Image (cartoon, grey):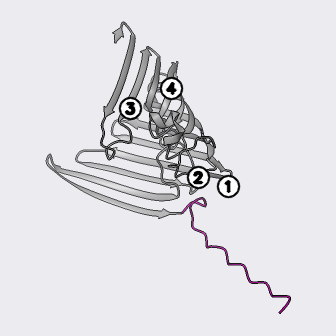
């Protein structure tokens, strides 16, 4: 619904099925989203698709988010729970994993922040993010379906990044540090770095990048900790209906200290019998 400069929206999707191979419950809430927007401000409540950056908050959560334009700055904040579905968020007995309480914030330049003040930097965006999470554990009425550690986990991360895009060239880089803690394994700290360059020409397009995700790096994004990879990609569009692609990658995986397999302890040696 739009009235002048104000827009409001509401979306609700429900599914009913008795087939347990399709969904866990007879009535399943697929999506709930309520929103409000006016010039410079946007607010959403419900199922949110966070996309702050590659190394920060980049996951769907159930909660609330708001975005505010303040001159050349854009401030975005979100808070909620990362859970399997709406029912498991409120009903502990049906959970297969702990809901993860999550908060994230991003402060960055607006898309046109440098257009007037520094024309040479037109297309540049700089930003910083922080995020924090903790598992909502409890010992009362806990589900027998849980597959996660009973200890639960908590952590935090912060990133800084920049991207530049003009005409057919784009460059992006981001650096992050994180802390992850679980009572049964202690505390880990690690870092991550991603960078990418691309050029979109005609008929050739090039793309190069590097990522180094620490084995114990933790954040609110779908990453593969322990991945170290450099890649290059070239696409040649010979005809409107024919193209050729060349892709080269060098990858290495380092397992996390939280998941690496350790050798089992040696069995205790038998004590001599003092009566023998």
Circle 3 Cα neighbour tier, 10 Å, few/some/many (<14 / 14–19 / ≥20): some
The location of residue 5, given as percent across then percent down, is: 39, 9
Q: Earlier in the sequence, mark 3 or mark 2?
A: 3
Q: Is residue 50 visible?
A: no
Nearer to us in this view, 133 or 225: 133
Mark-to-mark CA distance, 2 and 1: 9 Å
Q: Is residue 37 visible?
A: yes
Question: For residue 122, what is the image quadrant?
Answer: top left
Nearer to us in this view, 276 or 174: 276
Q: Which mark is residue 64?
A: 4
Q: Are marks 4 and 1 in contact (CB under 8 Å)?
A: no
Q: Is residue 28 above or below residue 42?
A: below
Q: Residue at x 56, y 61 (%)?
A: 259
The location of residue 42, given as percent across then percent down, is: 46, 20
The location of residue 225, given as percent across then percent down, is: 52, 54
Mark-to-mark CA distance, 1 and 3: 35 Å
User: Residue under circle 2?
Assistant: 149
Nearer to us in this view, 109 or 268: 268
Q: SS for tag 4? A: strand
Circle 4 Cα neighbour tier, 10 Å, few/some/many (<14 / 14–19 / ≥20): many
Quadrant in the picture for the C terminus: bottom right
Q: Earlier in the sequence, mark 4 or mark 2?
A: 4
């Amino acid at each position: 619904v739009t009235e002048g400069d104000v827009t409001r929206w509401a979306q609700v999707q429900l599914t009913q099925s008795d087939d347990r191979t399709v969904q866990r419950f007879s009535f399943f809430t697929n999506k709930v989203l309520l929103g409000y927007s006016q010039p410079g401000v946007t607010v959403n409540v419900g199922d949110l698709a966070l996309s702050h950056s590659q190394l920060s908050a980049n996951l769907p959560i159930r909660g609330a988010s708001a975005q505010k334009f303040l001159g050349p700055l854009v401030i975005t904040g979100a808070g909620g729970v990362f859970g399997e579905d709406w029912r498991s968020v409120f009903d502990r007995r049906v959970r297969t994993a702990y809901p993860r309480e999550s908060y994230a914030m991003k402060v960055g330049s607006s898309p046109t922040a440098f257009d007037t003040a520094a024309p040479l930097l037109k297309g540049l965006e700089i930003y910083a993010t922080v995020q924090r999470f903790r598992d909502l554990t409890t010992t009362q009425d806990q589900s027998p379906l849980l597959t996660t550690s009973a200890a639960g986990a908590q952590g935090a991360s912060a990133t800084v990044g920049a991207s530049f895009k003009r005409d057919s060239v784009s460059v992006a880089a981001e650096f992050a540090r994180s802390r992850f803690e679980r009572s049964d394994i202690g505390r880990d700290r690690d870092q991550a770095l991603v960078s990418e360059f691309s050029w979109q020409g005609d008929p050739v397009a090039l793309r190069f990048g590097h990522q180094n995700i620490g084995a114990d790096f933790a954040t609110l994004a779908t990453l593969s900790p322990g991945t170290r990879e450099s890649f290059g990609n070239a696409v040649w569009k010979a005809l409107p209906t024919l193209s050729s692609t060349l892709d080269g990658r060098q990858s290495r995986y380092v397992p996390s200290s939280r998941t690496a397999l350790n050798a089992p302890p040696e069995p205790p040696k038998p004590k001599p019998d003092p009566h023998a």
